[in-house]
Image (cartoon, coloured by chain):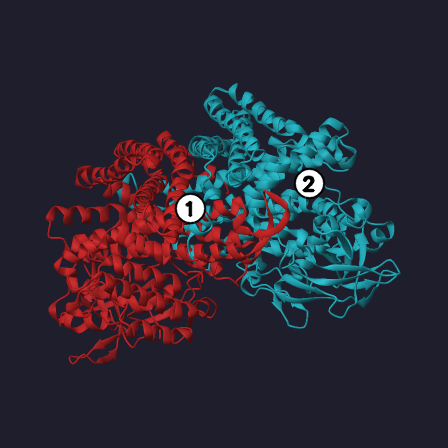
Chain colours: A red, B cyan
């Protein structure tokens, strides 16, 4: 039977053949695990995803959540059982610390599990897992009392979590937010304001929801410097841990969205009765720092989300292409009609999709591995480097995967032809779902500014040079393999092109042409994404080539698939990247020098 | 007030400054028109589109059509009045011959009007205008009696029209169709079969619908050679022209689609009672030829559809970018927050969208002008060349505009940020609507095969050389203008690159590597689209530059906009095209040589 959501063979290839996840077992943090446990965990995730979550996907899209006008939000009926199983089987906080009820898993293994859940029904996963993010913030920044009060229930999924950032006039520019907090004599704060676009802000799957809320304490500085973060529970929590009084935070609307219909995107109103109680998390005016720590994890999560949609769509489209009979083989017009996978254009489309799906998976797992090393390694240099690599590449995985992941979904619709435009096949809804990823948790434009202005200059550029150095290592390894020499040589040229372009772009944004520089930051992000994916492709090819000789029949086909896909990506897609490098290199200033009026439409 | 749907100044620029539509007035076919009439016609189209059609757009998307289970289809309430006005104001057959009740307008002027209608509510236009396509087929191939019976009511919009091609197992491969026709003693035929994806197949806006149906006469050859075309009216027509007996053709379903919710996409069942009467159009087994004549017009129409969605989305997003305050100016972080159009990345996004919207408009209008010349010119060489240019570039406008038009819509959502993902703004629905265009009337893959295997080799390649020659003429003209010399030089390189690549691709598909060749046909189509748009951009720049000196303030800004946009397209986007040329040039065979199993998922 055809595989669904993710190709399990490829997940294992990433975990054990490319990134040697077993290396993690040497560390104290992961010493209680072994490969057998990892395998079992991923198998269980796959089973739960395919047997329980996936069947609820259509209900999620077609029924969707409903806002009932009285502050309550109803999820589709089929979600109840799936959510219950997700929680009962302890998938809610896989990487969180065991001390507070998490599973303590490596991010790499958790990532593989989440790839299945995200592709099966991301909404269910979000309802069950957002509490882990909220709990993590409290674990990192909360008082002992706050930890005792909230974390276990958040990690266990008994309570839900959210993140209240955006207001209607404060989206990308959080400094404009107007939600206010007034300190009370008992040390609590009273909050007033309205937040929009709140994922899982209200729903009927849990009894209690804990909202971290960005707000400004009265008298605090303007802009981001005056933002604090508060814990605002839906129900106040009694001393004994039971739920007390209903807090004055209410859902007043759910958005009608392009996709993600099964997941409530809520407007949350605080203080309409003047009685919204919040508890300061960390210190006053440090809200942005605390929030950003969580945000980086969220951005990794969105990358995985896009990758999972793309992988799911790819496997659906691949299976359809194998089964749908239409058209003659180009070399035999008098023969029978053939499955459309025989048509060169469909194959080009499929191998393009495959190269992005595989490449994104490797890039994301590579970063998960670095997260694990940063957490568990005893070698300080390794920890620092791993942390830096995650920092550097977070805007790439978020910005790039969200956009190419979406393109893969769109191409899946194209493979289905007219049927792809109809709601009978899931690719239609998955494509709509995927569109959110390039928008939320910071648009691609925001990611590109973070990349160019903040991440690449980190450590005086040493981090970026280390990243280039890692790519060069893979290239050197590939050059030693005759069959891969040409591909390695081509990627080498692209890496050099990227390095040269980076210098030029950084010097441009440091000059008076700063605006011209930033007019090319998104194309630059795409270039760096392409080159990074080229690296992953070559890494795959090197790994596959080493294994090919001794491989059995099925593995042989798999490994040869890696070589073909790497060849395609580097020979057919990377030349376009070189064109993009020339484009940014030209540093055309037309976008910034053109008069506003000349854009037309007036 | 901001303009909606299309920038009227740019339409006039195309009609009168680039393509000299007034030249058409010299021809007998258009001698009764003048510029004033043209202007009035476009003004009226714009008024009707904006005042009557546009307000029904949201109802079309949100209410949608409903299939009632009894063979009837209900359109949204708001459509009734809009449709009535569209018909009463005689927009249903603008270019059809006046002899049969059409308006006899040049395609160029009709195109400008349809750009407004398509962007306002394409569904309303389709309900009112599809009869013109059906009527055109009958005018070209019908008997005198058939003409008398059907054409006037189709052109006037009193009756609706359709096109019944696709079956569930015969989509791109029409040769597999199984709908059968049995000849009766009275010369009529009895049809049996089921067609799917029938646009406007059934609805409540007209009393009668005329269906042209592809079917196979019993005993006819297999494949496309045995396909005939029949006129199958919903109601048989009495001798006196009144409606008679209900024919045995019934709608049995409407698709639930990604977009175009206001337009019924019907399953049509013929002969469930064994009494579906059809009338042969033309001769037996000539159905494909007749159908393709209409199909070319339909493909031009789809290109305009994509362009209109893109233009509409661009103007919405542009206006939003001018009004939405968010973030500081990059050169003044302590100043006030600014409209997002001040941000370089938003400007890059907008100028990218603008270049595609403007370029597509020019390309499509250029082809409309050629259609007009082909019809009206007395110079046989000019007629032949114009006809050929339309033939050659039809797969480009269909294949390329459908894809870049969609990209523009997606980018518009991105400019709106989170709001773009919500259904509160029309860009969300327009993006869903636009996705159909790369799928129906032949997918992009089909267009690319038509381009490479049929169109480019036409006239032994003379036609393609003439197309290259026309681009070279514009380039030569631009090289005489100092400010445009560099841009002209760059485009020249891309044109030469395209010409060289074309030779290589054609020789590849003529060799044993035919499959490798066709694995690059879609990328080739994109390259040719890019270069053709570059030509249009340079043409715009030459025209604008010539007018700039004597222009008033508002026109000056418009013309400078053309120069900036051309500069952006040629300096920033065309380098990527050169990369694409290198990509196809490399002619990587990985997609075709990879084992089916190596695609994974098994």
- Would you identify the image quadrant in which residue A11 lies? bottom left
Asked if residue B602 can be seen in this view, the reply is: yes
Identify the secondary structure beneath mark 1: helix
Side (left or right) of B364 relative to B326: right
Question: Quick one: SS at disc 2?
Answer: helix
Q: Which residue is mark 1?
A: B322
Label 2 crowd (10 A; few <14 / some 14-19 / many >=20): many
Dot 1: within a 10 Å radius of its alpha carbon, few (fewer than 14), some, or many (20 or more) residues? some
- Residue B60's place in the image compared with B307, above or below, is below
Q: Compare residues A408 and A551 and report the one nearer the observer.
A: A551
**Which is closer to the viewer, label 1 or label 2?**
2
The image position of residue B523, as x and y in percent, is: 50, 39
Q: Is A83 placed above or below A29 here?
A: below
Q: Chain of mark 2?
A: B
Residue B3 in view (yes/no): no
Q: Which residue is mark 2?
A: B107
Question: Which of the chains bears the disc numbered 1?
Answer: B
Give coordinates of residue A565: x percent, y percent. 40, 44
Q: Name which quarter of the figure residue B201 lies in.
A: bottom right
Say which of A414 and A290 sits in front: A414
Q: Horizontal and vertical percent for residue A478?
A: 29, 37
Q: Nearer the viewer, residue A226 or B408?
A: B408
Q: Which mark is residue A320?
A: none
**Residue at the spot 74% in from the left edge and 38% down from the top edge:** B33
The residue positioned 42% from the left and 74% from the top of the image is: A78
> At 73% across and 33% down in the image, what residue appears?
B25
Q: CA distance from mark 1 to mark 2?
A: 34 Å
């Amino acid at each position: 039977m055809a595989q669904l959501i993710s190709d399990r063979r490829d997940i294992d290839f990433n975990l054990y053949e490319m990134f040697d996840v077993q290396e993690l077992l040497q560390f104290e943090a992961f010493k209680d695990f072994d490969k057998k446990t990892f395998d079992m965990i991923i198998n269980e995730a796959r089973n739960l995803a395919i047997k329980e979550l996936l069947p609820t996907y259509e209900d999620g899209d077609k029924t969707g959540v409903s806002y009932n006008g009285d502050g309550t939000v109803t999820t589709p009926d089929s979600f109840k059982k799936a959510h219950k199983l997700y929680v009962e089987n302890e998938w809610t906080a896989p990487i969180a610390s065991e001390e507070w009820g998490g599973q303590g898993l490596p991010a790499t293994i958790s990532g593989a599990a989440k790839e299945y859940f995200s592709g099966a029904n991301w909404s269910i996963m979000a309802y069950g897992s957002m509490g882990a993010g909220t709990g993590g913030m409290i674990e990192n920044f909360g008082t002992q009392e706050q930890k005792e009060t909230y974390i276990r229930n958040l990690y266990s999924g008994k309570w839900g979590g959210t993140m209240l950032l955006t207001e209607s006039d404060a989206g990308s520019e959080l400094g404009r937010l107007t939600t206010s907090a007034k300190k009370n004599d008992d040390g609590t704060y009273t909050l007033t304001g309205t937040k929009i676009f709140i994922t899982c802000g209200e729903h009927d799957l849990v009894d209690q929801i804990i909202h971290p809320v960005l707000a400004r304490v009265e008298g605090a500085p303007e802009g981001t410097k005056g933002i604090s973060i508060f814990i605002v529970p839906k129900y106040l929590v009694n001393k004994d841990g039971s739920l007390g009084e209903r807090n004055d935070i209410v859902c007043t609307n759910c958005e009608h969205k392009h996709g993600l219909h099964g997941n409530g995107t809520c407007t949350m109103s605080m203080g309409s009765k003047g009685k919204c109680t919040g508890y300061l998390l960390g210190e006053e005016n440090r809200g942005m720092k605390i929030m950003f720590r969580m945000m980086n994890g969220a951005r990794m999560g969105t990358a995985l989300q896009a990758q999972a949609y793309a992988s799911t769509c790819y496997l659906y489209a691949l299976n359809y292409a194998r089964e749908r009979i239409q058209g003659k083989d180009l070399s035999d017009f008098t023969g029978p009609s053939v499955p459309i996978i025989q048509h060169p254009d469909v194959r080009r489309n499929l191998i393009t999709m495959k190269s992005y799906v595989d490449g994104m998976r490797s890039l994301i797992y590579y970063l998960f591995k670095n997260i694990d090393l940063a957490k568990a390694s005893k070698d300080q240099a390794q920890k620092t480097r791993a942390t830096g690599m995650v920092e550097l590449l977070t805007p790439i995985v978020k910005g790039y995967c969200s956009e190419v992941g979406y393109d893969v979904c769109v191409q899946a619709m194209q493979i289905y032809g007219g049927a792809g435009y109809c709601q009978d096949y899931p690719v239609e809804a998955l494509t709509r779902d995927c569109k959110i990823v390039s928008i939320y948790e910071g648009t691609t434009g925001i990611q590109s500014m973070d990349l160019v202005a903040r991440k690449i200059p980190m450590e005086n550029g040493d981090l970026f040079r280390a990243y280039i150095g890692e790519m060069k290592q893979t290239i050197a390894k590939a050059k030693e393999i005759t069959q891969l020499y040409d591909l390695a040589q081509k990627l080498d040229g692209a890496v050099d092109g990227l390095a040269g372009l980076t210098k030029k772009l950084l010097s441009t944004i440091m000059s008076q042409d700063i605006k011209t520089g930033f007019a090319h930051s998104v194309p630059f992000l795409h270039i760096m994404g392409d080159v990074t994916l080229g690296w992953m492709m070559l890494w795959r090819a090197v790994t596959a080539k080493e294994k090919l000789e001794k491989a059995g029949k099925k593995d042989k086909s798999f490994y040869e698939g890696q070589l073909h896909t790497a060849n395609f990506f580097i020979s057919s897609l990377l030349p376009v990247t070189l064109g993009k490098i020339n484009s940014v290199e030209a540093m055309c200033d037309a976008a910034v020098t053109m008069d506003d009026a000349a854009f037309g439409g007036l």
